[in-house]
Amino acid sequence: MPLCCRLCFGWDSSGGGGTTPIKADIVGSVSSTPPNSFTHNPLSGLNMVTVNLRATTVAAVLTVLADQTTATCPSRFSWENNVLTKAAVNSTNNAELFDFGPVEGTPASSNIIGGIPRPRCKTFPGDPLWPSNSVWNLLNLTLGGALIKTVPLAAPCYSDWPQYDAAQCEYVKTNWNRPQLHVEDPTSAMFPLWQGQTCMPLDHPSQIYDNCTLGGYASYSVAVTKVSQIQLALNFARATNIRLVVKNTGHDFADKSMGAGSLSVWTHKLKDIQYIPDYTCNGHSGPALKLGSGVETEEVYQAAEAHNVTVVGGECRTVGMAGGYIAGGGHSPMSSLVGMGADQVLSLDVVLPNGRFVTASQSSYPDLFWALRGGGGSTYGVVTSVTVKAYPQIPVSTLGFVFGTSSNVTADTFWAGVEAYTTYFDTFTAVGAYGYWLIVNIGPGQFFFSMNPLWGGNMTLAQFQPLIQPFLDDLANLGISIDPVWNEYPSLYQAHSGTFPPENVGGADNRAASRLFPKDNFINPTKRNETMAAVRYAVEAGGILIGYNIRAAPNSAVNQTNSVNPAWRETTGFFILAAAWPADASPAVIQAQSNILTNDWMARWRQVSPGAGSYLSEGDINEPNWQQSFYGSHYPRLLQLKKKYDPTGLFYAHTAVGSEDWEVEGQLPGLPTQNGRLCKKP
Ligand SMILES: Cc1cc2nc3c(=O)[nH]c(=O)nc-3n(C[C@H](O)[C@H](O)[C@H](O)COP(=O)(O)OP(=O)(O)OC[C@H]3O[C@@H](n4cnc5c(N)ncnc54)[C@H](O)[C@@H]3O)c2cc1C
C-alpha cells in the first residue's frame, strides 16, 4: 500500500470547487481571504486530507442535512429528524472527516484509519496530527456554529486569560459549590480533583497552581441541538483519532464527562419533554414521558406534576435523567416501590459510535437496549432521548429527625440506634419505603445522625406512621429522643421539593466509594453485627456515611431484563462512604487518605459482603476489581457488546465497560485525573 494514508488536515488553497475560499481563523469567524501558509502537516508518510474550506462545501453539508422523518414509536423530537446522511457526507469535499464508521459488528476494518493501523494513543493538542485552526473552523461551520473552544470556568480569575473579569471571577467563586454552575458550563464537572485542579477559582483553598490551564477539560465542545451535530462530532473524532467525551451535567463522581485533548459532545441543550398520555408500543400501554437527554431531574418532576403523573428519578435536582442516570441504573425514592430508573425505559434513541442514529427498544437493537439500561454512560453511543413509563400521581409521607451522642447517649447507644434502624431495612423497603440519611463523626467518640427523609411512597401519613413507629419505639427504648417532623404531600414533586436538601459539589477535599449491601447483611444477626462493626470502624476513623435504605423492587409492569448491576436486586442498604482531607492537602496526603478509603475502610465493607457490588455512578474511582463490583455477572456480555458497537474505542470513560484496555498517561498512583493523553495500554 502506498503511503497515502489520511490523517492530516490542512488548508489546500488549490482545492477544487471554484468558489470563494473561506478563511476561518478562530472558531466561528469566517473571512474570504485564504491564509498565507499551511499550519501543518509535517508528518511524512501520511497523505493530507485536503480541507477544501469553500463556501459550497459547507453549504452543501448544511443543505443536505434535510429533516428525515422516520416512523418510530414514539415519534422523534423535531431535532432528532435532522440527521446526517451518507449523501450529505458524499456531497462535501471533506467526506474523510465526516464519514460514517463501519456497520456495527464488522470489526475487521475498523481499526484502520486512513489506511494505517489506528495509533495506540489518541491525537493530543500539540501533536503534528492535531487539527489546525482551519479544520476546527470547518467543523464549526459544518456544525452550524455549535463548536465552543474551551474556556475553563474559572478562567475569568486569571489575568493572562482574555476572559479575565474580576466580577465574573467572584461569581464563579461564590457559586463553585452549586451544581448548576457546572451543569451550565460546556465542559466543567463537579469533582475538580479528577480534572487535575488546573484552574480552580483564585484563592480557593484547593487551588494548587498559580496559573490556569485546560488540564482535564475537553479542548472543544459541541453544544448540540440536533442529532446531525452529534453524528458529525462522532465521525470527526473517529476520523481524526481525537478523544471523545460526552458531557451532560457533569455529576459523575469520577468526572467521566471530561478528558484532556478531547472533543466533547455537550447534551445540556436537549431539553424537550413530551408527555404521551396513551403510549402504546414496546409492550407498554399507558402514560409515558419522552425526555431529551439534557433534562434534569427537577425539570422532569415538574413536567410530571403538571400532567398528574409520577416518574422514577433521583434525589439530586440537577442530575441528568436521560444521560448518566439511566445509563448507570438510576436509584430513586421510588425504587423501593417500582424498581430502578433504568427499569422504566421503553425505548432510547442513540447515535452509535459509527455515527448511525438508531432506536433501541425490546424489538429494535434489543442487545443495545439491554446494555444502555445499566451498562454505564459514554460506552455504546450518545443517547439523544429516552422514553420512560409514567405512573399515576401518588401521595408521599415523610419523616425527618436527627440524633447524636450526648451526655445521655453514649457512642455505643448511638450505634445501637443505627443498628435498630437497619433491622427494619427489609420491612420498610418491602412495602415501598425509602430512607436517605447521613452519619458524621463530629469528634472523638461523637457522632451525628440525620434522616433526610424517611420516605413513604404511595402512603398517607395514616399508613406511614404505624409502619415507622416500632423503629421510633426502639430508639426511645434505647434512650435516644428525637423530635420527629412528619409531613404528607400529594405528589412526588412536592415531597421531593419539601424534603431533600440542596447538594454541595465542587470540592477537592474529599472523595467517595460505595457498597450495595445485600439484605441478608441486615437480616442475619451475625452478618448484621459484622456489617455494623465495619461501618462503625470507618465512621470512627473519620469517614462520612451517606446511607440509603432502598431496594430495586421487582415490578412485572416493566422490563427489568437489563444490565443494571445485579447487586442492586439484592440490596436493602446502599451506603456511600467519603474520606475527607484539608482543602489545601498535598497530593501525598490525598493519596494516603484515598488509600485508606479503598484499602482499609472499604476493604472491611467488601469483606462482610463478599460477591456484592457497588454503584458505578457513585463509586470509588479506585474500586478494585471494578468490573465485578460495578457490573457483576453482566460484565462479559457488556464487554462483548462494547466490542460489537464500538470496535475502535471511540468512547472511553474511567471504569466504563472496555476501559481496562486504556490508560490516561502521567498520573500519580491512586489519583487518576483526566489530565493526560489517552492511550491504549501496551
Ligand atoms: C450530588 C449528586 C447526587 C446524585 N444523586 C443521585 C441519585 O439520587 N440517584 C442516582 O442514581 N444517582 C445519583 N447521582 C449520580 C448520578 O446519577 C450520576 O453521576 C450520573 O452519571 C449523572 O449523569 P449526568 O448525565 O447528569 O452527568 P454526567 O457527569 O454529565 O454524565 C455521566 C456519565 O454519563 C455519560 N453521559 C451523559 N449523557 C450521556 C448521553 N446522552 N449519552 C451517553 N452517555 C452520556 C457521560 O459521558 C458520563 O460518562 C448523584 C450524583 C451527585 C453528584
Image: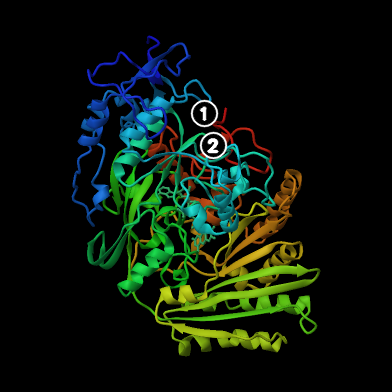
Q: Nearer the viewer, residue 155 or 190?
A: 155
**In the rendered view, would you say 189 is above or below 213?**
below
The reply, left or right, for residue 33 in relation to residue 518 is: left
* x then y, percent, for residue 332: 47, 67
* x then y, percent, for residue 37: 42, 15
**In the rendered view, would you say 347 is above or below 496?**
above
Badge 1 is on which residue?
A: 124
* x then y, percent, for residue 453: 55, 76
Q: Is residue 560 visible?
A: yes
Q: Nearer the viewer, residue 331 or 660?
A: 331
**In the rendered view, would you say 386 is above or below 389?**
above
Give the secondary structure at mark 2: loop
The reply, left or right, for residue 278 in relation to residue 482 is: left
Query: Label 1 is placed on what type of residue?
Result: Phe
Name which of mark 1 and mark 2 comes first in the sequence: 1
Query: Label 2 is placed on what type of residue?
Result: Ala
The reply, left or right, for residue 127 in relation to residue 286 is: right
**In the rendered view, would you say 72 is above or below 14?**
below
* Image quadrant occupied by the C terminus: top right
Give the secondary structure at mark 1: loop
Badge 2 is on which residue?
A: 260
Marks 1 and 2 sit apart, C-alpha to C-alpha, by 8 Å
Residue at the extreme front of the image, as rendered: 166
Q: Are marks 1 and 2 in contact (CB under 8 Å)?
A: yes
Number of callouts: 2
Q: Residue at x 65, y 79 (%)?
A: 402
Q: Is residue 104 visible?
A: no
- Residue 444: image quadrant is bottom right
* x then y, percent, for residue 154: 57, 46
